[in-house]
Image: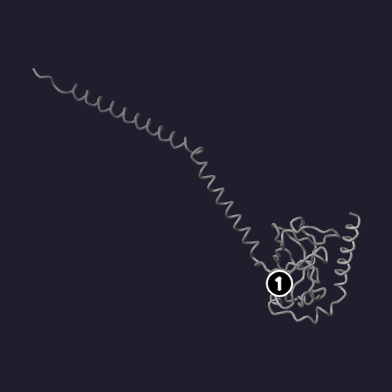
């Protein structure tokens, strides 16, 4: 058990040292031939890149990314820019059991927390990305680099607000029979009684008029 801990610590130290060294090779980023697809997504890829490494005969640019949120095994991140700003939101999907190194500790992607910084590898020749594994022995998982639309968050908020408005309207419509139901009934009954009173008064007036006319008529001898 102790030997396993020592090996894990050594592997973590090795990976941490490799990540720290990435900031010491900016010339490799300057000379990297980023594809047009990469530059369309990240025009300042050369400036944001920390290093370039080779894996399986392919070149990968090393970046630091800021984690915004996690949904299952999909990470929504933003690439860090040299001026302290961040790029557009990007989705990276990893395998459920994939682990990354966070503060020297191997951590499953679904256990990550917002605002943590991770290391990502982007292929120089095409928009593919992989998260840096927790240990050198862990297999890479390369997935398409998905750039989320800039208005996706705003559209999502607008849809949620519209849904809430419709729900509130529907609840109000459903509540109306309970709150407004007795009022029309009371008004109808009031009008009925008023009409009945007017009708009764009119009938009494007609009868009184007929009696007066009969009283004025001469009686026959």
Q: Position of residue 180 (x, y in %)?
A: 49, 39
Say how the picture is coloured: one colour
Q: Residue at x 91, y 55 (%)?
A: 2
Q: Front-most of 118 and 157? A: 118
From what the image shows, is residue 217 above or below residue 1?
above
Q: Residue at x 85, y 69 (%)?
A: 19
Q: Which residue is mark 1?
A: 128
The number of numbered discs placed on residues in the rendered structure image is 1
Q: Front-most of 52 and 1? A: 1
Q: Front-most of 218 and 33? A: 33
Q: Position of residue 203 (x, y in %)?
A: 28, 28
Give the SS element for disc 1.
strand
Q: Is residue 96 left or right of residue 177?
A: right
From what the image shows, is residue 99 above or below residue 18?
above
Q: Residue at x 24, y 26 (%)?
A: 209
Query: Could you tell me which quadrant the C terminus lies in?
Result: top left
Q: Position of residue 216 (x, y in %)?
A: 18, 23
Q: Quadrant of residue 103?
A: bottom right
């Amino acid at each position: 058990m102790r030997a396993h801990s020592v090996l894990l610590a050594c592997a973590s130290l090795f990976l941490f040292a490799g990540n720290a060294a990435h900031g010491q090779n900016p010339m490799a980023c300057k000379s990297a031939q980023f594809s047009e697809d990469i530059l369309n997504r990240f025009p300042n890829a050369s400036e944001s890149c920390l290093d370039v490494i080779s894996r399986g005969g392919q070149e990968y640019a090393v970046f630091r990314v800021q984690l915004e949120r996690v949904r299952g095994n999909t990470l929504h991140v933003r690439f860090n820019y040299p001026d302290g700003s961040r790029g557009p939101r990007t989705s990276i999907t990893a395998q459920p059991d994939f682990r990354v190194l966070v503060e020297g500790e191997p951590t499953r992607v679904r256990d990550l927390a917002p605002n943590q910084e991770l290391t990502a590898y982007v292929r120089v020749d095409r928009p593919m990305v992989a998260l840096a594994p927790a240990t050198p022995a862990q297999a890479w998982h390369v997935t398409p680099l998905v750039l989320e639309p800039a208005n996706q968050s705003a559209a999502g908020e607008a849809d949620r607000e519209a849904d809430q408005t419709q729900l509130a309207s529907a609840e109000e419509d459903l509540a109306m029979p309970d709150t407004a139901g007795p009022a029309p009934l009371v008004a109808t009954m009031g009008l009925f009684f008023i009409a009945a009173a007017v009708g009764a008064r009119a009938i009494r007036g007609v009868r009184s008029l007929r009696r007066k006319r009969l009283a004025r008529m001469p009686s026959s001898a």
